[in-house]
């Protein structure tokens, strides 16, 4: 892929997620190797990986810039808060979780809204309402199980007038940089929505990648169990 502009990978995990296999340092180095300029660190239900990644990037200007965030489990499925630096309780109704994100000045990002076989996907009954409340709807997810879900997410975003985001949803090094948005300028909390609206999505998903994602999806529960039994992986 040859593109001009800045590459924003808006959905990634470290070993601070129960099924993540990368330290924050490994994620940043992998993103750098893939030409990613900004990486959102969105671990499951914790901001610790994001804060550590911010510190690493602040200390080394050669690394991608970090958008701190969290992929939050609500009573209705997962949502992502971007530019979030404080913990939010797990299990809240989705509308209340969105309010907590906004109280921090964060942006609401709806991940993989149609990947129905994925653990944590927003419930169908709350999908449209959550997308209406969101600032960004993810239209390409690097761990999707097929292109149909991306097509549906794209139509949902267009119908509601929401910018379409993209993220690798990387849990391991080989997945980093698989999906991203290309924008024309360095983003901030105040400019991200407009930049994504004017930008475009790029990804490296292919029939081979979708097939691999089916296998990796099956490994996620194994990884979570192994982590609980053996303890957390080294995070540096």
Image (spheres, helix red, strand yellow):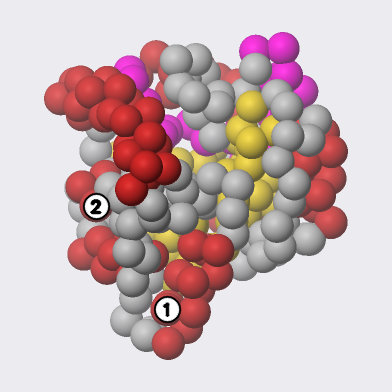
The part of the image, by quadrant, that contains residue 14 is: bottom left
Q: Position of residue 44 (x, y in %)?
A: 54, 45
Reading the image, the residue beneath label 2 is 173
Whole-percent x and y of residue 178? 29, 44
Relative horizontal placement of residue 234, taking residue 151 as reference (left or right)? left
Q: Is 25 or 103 nearer to us in this picture?
A: 25
* In magenta segment, residue 134: yes
Q: Is residue 10 visible?
A: no
Q: Residue furthest left?
A: 208
Q: Position of residue 201 (x, y in %)?
A: 40, 42
Location of residue 232 (image quadrant): bottom left
Mark 2 to mark 1 CA distance (whole Å): 17 Å
Q: Residue at x 24, y 38 (%)?
A: 204
Q: Residue furthest bottom?
A: 59
Rendered image: mark on residue 56: 1
The span shown in magenta is: 124-146
Q: Is residue 134 left or right of residue 110?
A: right
Which residue is pictured at 42% across the width and 50% down the height?
13
């Amino acid at each position: 892929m040859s593109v001009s502009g800045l590459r924003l990978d808006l959905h990634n995990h470290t070993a601070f997620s129960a099924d993540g296999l990368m330290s924050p340092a490994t994620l940043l180095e992998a993103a750098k190797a893939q030409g990613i300029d900004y990486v959102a660190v969105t671990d499951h239900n914790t901001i610790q990986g994001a804060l550590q990644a911010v510190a690493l990037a602040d200390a080394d200007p050669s690394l991608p810039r970090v958008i701190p965030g969290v992929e939050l489990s609500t009573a209705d499925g997962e949502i992502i808060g971007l530019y979030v630096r404080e913990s939010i309780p797990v299990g809240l109704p989705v509308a209340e979780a969105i309010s907590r994100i906004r109280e921090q000045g964060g942006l609401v990002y709806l991940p993989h809204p149609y990947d129905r076989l994925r653990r944590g996907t927003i419930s169908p009954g709350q999908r449209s309402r959550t997308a209406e409340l969101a600032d960004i709807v993810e239209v390409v997810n690097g761990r999707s199980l097929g292109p149909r879900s991306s097509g549906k997410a794209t139509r949902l975003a267009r119908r509601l007038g929401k910018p379409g985001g993209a993220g690798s949803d990387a849990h391991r090094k080989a997945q980093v940089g698989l999906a991203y948005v290309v924008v024309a300028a360095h983003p901030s909390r105040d400019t991200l929505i407009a930049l994504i609206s004017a930008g475009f999505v790029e990804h490296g998903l292919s029939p081979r990648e979708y097939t691999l994602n089916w296998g990796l999806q099956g490994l996620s529960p194994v990884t979570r169990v192994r982590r609980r039994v053996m303890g957390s992986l080294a995070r540096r």
